[in-house]
Each structure stands twice: as C-alpha cells, then as structure tokens.
Image (spheres, helix red, strand yellow):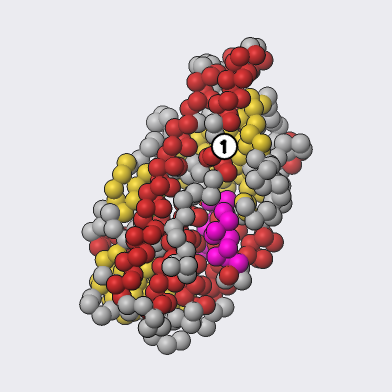
Amino acid sequence: MSAPRVLIVGGGPVGLTASLLLSQRGIANVVVERRDETLRAPAAHVLRRRPMDVFARLGVSDDILRAAPHLPIDAITWCATFGGPDAGRLDVSANSSSPLDPVWTNCPQNLLEPILLDHAKRCPEARILRGVECTDLVPGSTSVRATLHHGDGREEAIEAAWAIAADGAGSPTRRRLGIPMLGDGPQGRFFMTHFRADLRPWLEGRSGPLFWILNPDSPGTLIVHEPERSHVFMTIQRGEPDEREGLPTRLRAALGVDAPFEIVSIDEWSPHVQVAERYREGRVFLAGDAAHRFPPSGGLGLNTGILDADHLCHRLAEVEAGRADEASLDRYEEACRPAAQANADASFGNLLRLGAIGKVLGRCTDLGALEARLASLSADERRALDDAIELQRSHFVSDGHVPDDPRAA
Ligand SMILES: Cc1cc2nc3c(=O)[nH]c(=O)nc-3n(C[C@H](O)[C@H](O)[C@H](O)COP(=O)(O)OP(=O)(O)OC[C@H]3O[C@@H](n4cnc5c(N)ncnc54)[C@H](O)[C@@H]3O)c2cc1C
C-alpha cells in the first residue's frame, strides 16, 4: 500500500464506513482502532434508508440484510412486563412490514461491525490496524502527523494528508484539538445489560424489537436483538450501593416470564445532547459520535455518523482528484452539523415525550398496582393512553434530519 492520504482514528462503524468510501474512490487510507475485537454488545440496531443507500453503494448491504435478524418491526409495545399485560402498542407496520424492508433494517451493531471490517480489510487501498492506539495527532499546514502505539509496545510515526477523527463520543482526538462539545451533558445514568435468552415462545403474535417496560419495580427498555439468543435491557441507575448485583433481579422483574437467561455484560452509559462546536481543525475532521452525541431515543446516532462519513469522504475524494479546492471541505460542516443539531434536539424531544404515557397512568407503587390500574382504565383514560402512545410515532418512524447529498450539489 502506498503512503496513506487519509488517517482514520477509530475503527467503529463510522471509521470503517469512511475507509470503505475512500477505498472505493481509490484513496489510500489507514484505520487505527485500539480495540482488538469488534463490539460484542449490541448498541445501535436500526439502520435507516439513507445509510442503507450508502451501504448499497459500497456493496455491503446484501451482507447486512443476510445478517439482520428476521424480526419484523411491526409494533412498539408498552407493557407492564415483557410477558404482559400490554398497556398499548404503536402499529408501525405501514412503515416497515418486513425485517428486510429498506425503510428500517434491524441489524444490531455487533453484527454490523464485523461485516464492515471484513469488507474494509479486503480493499487494497486500506491498511486496518487493530489493537493500536493513536496517542498523538498534530495537524500541520500540508499534512497531519500522528503517533501510533501498537499492542506490543512499539511506537510508529505516521503522516497523512488528512485525518478523520471517528474515535467515538469520548474522542481523544477532539479533546487534543481543543474542540468543545456544545449542549447538555449527562441526562441520567443507565445500565445496558446484554443477556442471552430464547424469547421466541413469548414473541408469538407480539413483534419486536422494542418493549417499553412500565413495571414500577423495574422500568426500562427491552430490545430484542436476536429473538432466539441476544437482547438488551436498559434501565436507569438509582444510585444505590451494589446496584449492579441487583440487576439480575431487576431483569427478571422486567421480563415477567419464566425464561432462563444469562447475563453477558453490563455497561454503564449516559445520554448527552451535544454537538461539537466545529467539525474541522485544519486537516482534521470530526465524524460520528466524535462530532455529536444523542440519547438513543430515535436511533439516530449511528445513522447520522454514516451520513457524516459519506458526505466528508465524497468531498475529500473530490479534492484529492483535483476537482474541488480545499475550501470546499468547509461545506462538510455546513451540511452535516445542522443535521446533527436537529437530530440531537429530536432525540431529546423523543425522550421527553415518552413521559406522556406515565402521566396518563399516574404513579403506581408496584407491579400489582400497575396491573390493577391497566385493568380498570375508563374509556376516556384508555383513549388518553392511546393518544399518548400515538404521540410517540415520530420517534419511531422518522428518518431523522439528513444532510444534503454532496453529489447533488
Ligand atoms: C444503548 C445504545 C443504543 C443505541 N442505539 C442506536 C440505534 O438504534 N441507532 C443508531 O443510529 N445509534 C444508536 N446508538 C448510537 C451508536 O451506538 C453510536 O452512534 C455509534 O457507535 C457511533 O459510531 P462511531 O463509529 O462514531 O463511534 P464508536 O462506535 O464509539 O467507535 C469509535 C471507535 O474509536 C476507537 N478509539 C477511540 N479512541 C481511539 C484512539 N485514541 N486510537 C484508536 N482508536 C480509538 C474506539 O475503540 C471505538 O471502537 C446507540 C448507542 C447506545 C449506547
């Protein structure tokens, strides 16, 4: 491989997509990823139409569709526990009647990443380094110099014409460049419990993948990623001592069915509503979570990042080919930053609107009280609950705000 024109820091979905996009245009690139392995726990899982168009152009979408679990996204369910009773359902079948519908592709991130990695590695234009950390990065007037720390302790100096910081929400590169995030910091703290269980017996006639658990003893969101084996339960941290030890009990209470389960991992995370003050520092560009952090309500984080990569790599390729000048790269921020801000605001709005459902039901002290409340709703209360559920539609069916297609400009 010739000397890289573009250094990509971070080999998550956005960095790997950037690598594929550059390779497709014949641009030598190097991806530096500090993790040895691809992501194990599913995080993002819904891929929207425009990012899937990008994957189709890259010849990756068939593999994604093959890997996508065959779970129809027909309805979103609010329920006392996963086993019921249901408080109500939002029918989204008009938007997505099949798991392979191009509107929504349900492919958990832990299945997506290996596919992107596999394709990226096959491109002769790309050098993919894993278990390697970028420990320094200095943009100069004609190139970017970086220091890489290999797993065996070796240090490597590297130079490229451009760099893309796709190194995630904590982005060490963004910090190094002194680019602040604007917006609101942590909106609570959550546990993401990834667990294995065969939930198929309870999914008959109840399509997933999202179940909003209202049980006052263990409220949260259950995401059925792969019905026969892989799921996530997201629940708020209460700030109690030894809280992690109580998570199996909380998961059992959320499930409300006699399904044996095995906890694979417990991660802690905090939603933020933030966008980077600027997307560019000379020859370095921010993309993906390095540039914006949204609550997962709306599933827009990964999707927005894929479109960042698409827009930026197209512009970089035009400059590299001599068809555009370097100033045109400013249009990346002009197009993608407002879209990210709108998606940050929309994701936060989605989070706030969820409260409308609890408002109708009022405060229930335990599961028994909630079940009694659901069983005794008056006709007016039932209507109010249905309206509150209907209010959530844009949360689930929106494609989010997308930047202009740079190819159309
Ligand atoms: C619970 C949850 C649910 C979500 N659901 C959705 C959803 O349904 N839809 C959606 O679109 N989004 C969703 N998201 C958001 C989505 O997971 C992120 O937006 C996505 O992972 C961002 O990808 P990225 O490549 O920008 O960053 P990351 O996936 O964070 O990748 C960054 C990579 O950079 C590497 N790195 C960091 N520093 C260095 C360094 N110095 N040197 C080398 N490598 C480095 C990291 O190891 C990491 O692999 C969800 C997130 C969470 C937490």
Ligand 1 is within 8 Å of the C-beta of the residue at disc 1: no
In terms of depth relative to the viewer, which is nearer, 152 or 127? 127
Looking at the rendering, the quadrant in which ligand 1 lies is: bottom left
Residue 329: x and y in percent read 34, 70
Asked which quadrant contains residue 323, the reply is bottom left
Residues drawn in magenta: 36-56
Q: Position of residue 84 (x, y in %)?
A: 68, 27
Q: Name the one closer to the observer, 398 or 238.
A: 398
Residue kind at label 1, given as amino acid type: Arg
Q: Residue at x 64, y 42 (%)?
A: 209
Is 203 on the left-hand or right-hand side of 27? right
Residue found at the very far front of the displayed protein? 409
Q: Taking the image as drawn, is residue 130 in sight?
A: no
Q: Which residue is mark 1?
A: 393
**Looking at the picture, how far across and down is residue 287, in whole percent?**
39, 61
Where residue 370 sits in the image (x, y, percent)?
59, 18
Mark count: 1
Please say if 1 is above or below 129: below
Residue 288 in view, yes or no: yes
Residue at the farthest bottom position: 2
- Magenta residue check for 206: no
Check the image and report above or below for 148 versus 99.
Answer: below
In front of the other: 112 or 55? 55
Query: Image quadrant for the C terminus?
Result: bottom left
Please, what secondary structure does the residue beneath circle 1 have?
Answer: helix
Q: Residue 216, relative to residue 57: is it above or below? A: above
In the image, taking residue 38 as reference, residue 239 lies left or right, namely left
In the displayed structure image, the side of residue 213 where residue 257 appears, left or right: right
Question: At 68% from the left edge and 43% from the top edge, which residue is drawn?
Answer: 94
Question: Residue drawn 54% across and 75% down?
Answer: 121
Residue 94 in the figure: left or right of residue 14: right
Within-10-Å neighbours for mark 1: few <14, some 14–19, many 20+: some
